[in-house]
Image (cartoon, helix red, strand yellow):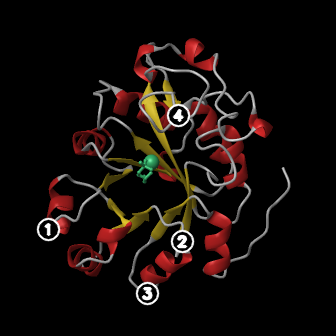
Amino acid sequence: MKIYAHRGYSSKYPENTLAAFYAAANLPIDGVEFDVHLTKDRQVVVIHDETIDRTSNGKGFVKDMTLQELREFDYGSWFSKEFAGARIPTLKEVLSVFRSTDLHVNIELKSDIFVYSGLEELVLREVESLEMLEQVVISSFDHEAVARVAELAPNLENAALFVNTILDIAEYQGKLPAKALHVSLPSAVRRPVREAIEKGSVVRVWTVNEVEHAALLTNTGVDAIFTDEPETMLSFFGKRNVLIEE
Ligand code: G3P
Ligand code: MG
């Protein structure tokens, strides 16, 4: 089972910050996942929510602030005083952390609530300029965005994200088209996903933080799990569990 650190190493470090990404990069895992939004001045930034309210000491929508305005706030203190002063990272900064690693990098486009016109092009441009096209998978719950990525970069890996179980999910995957399916834990063990795996779909599962849940996925053909607890999952799946010092 491959292990992807969800929002970086997000159980031990503030999610989607450089601290969480450096910690993930230093683990013997397979990949990392993070979320992107577009600022008022069209910069791609790494943060989960549409607003900065939950994960910073500020308030407001990412889309209504410039990068400079967003940089004024602290994205670490909400998690622990130890991380006070953490800034919101740009896509470029996060990609740069992983460029020299062999981790698979999952960029999740958070355009399922607000339409971020041109986000796919901006993300692709950044990935291309760092020559990371083969290291990246771009996913979204916004399947229009998934289809646009397929159109703009047919060779790059794209993935459709699902909350619910979809009947004929493999057929739907072909229509989009998407190269991989990123499904929720409950739907991962249902018939449609099991059949898709049998037909050859690459399936990754979010978000698996309990070993009891991970155990349900062993020998199912699932390719990878996204987890906030990468070291727990490394121990569970019996991999080398060594943290290399920064
Ligand atoms: O990409 C997998 C997972 O991150 C999707 O859900 O809300 O954690 O972005 P969320
Ligand atoms: Mg995500």
Residue assigned mark 1: 167
Q: Nearer the N terminus, badge 2 or badge 1?
A: 1
Q: Position of residue 160 (x, y in %)?
A: 30, 53
Task: Say which mark, if any, is on residue 219.
Answer: 3
Q: Is residue 59 above or below residue 16?
A: above
Q: Residues within 10 Å of mark 1 (few under 14, many from 20)?
A: few
Q: Which residue is at the front of the view, 120 or 9? A: 9
Asked if residue 202 is positioned above or below residue 86 in the image, the reply reads: below
Distance between mark 2 and mark 1 Cα atoms:
27 Å
In the picture of the structure, the residue carrying the numbered disc 4 is 54
Q: Position of residue 128 (x, y in %)?
A: 49, 36
Task: Please name the residue shown 60% across and 57% down the image.
Answer: 103
Comparing 56 with 132, the one in front is 56
**Which disc, if any, is residue 210?**
2
User: Which tag is nearer the camera, tag 2 or tag 1?
Assistant: 2
Q: Secondary structure at mark 4?
A: loop
Residue 12, horizontal then vertical, whole percent = 69, 53
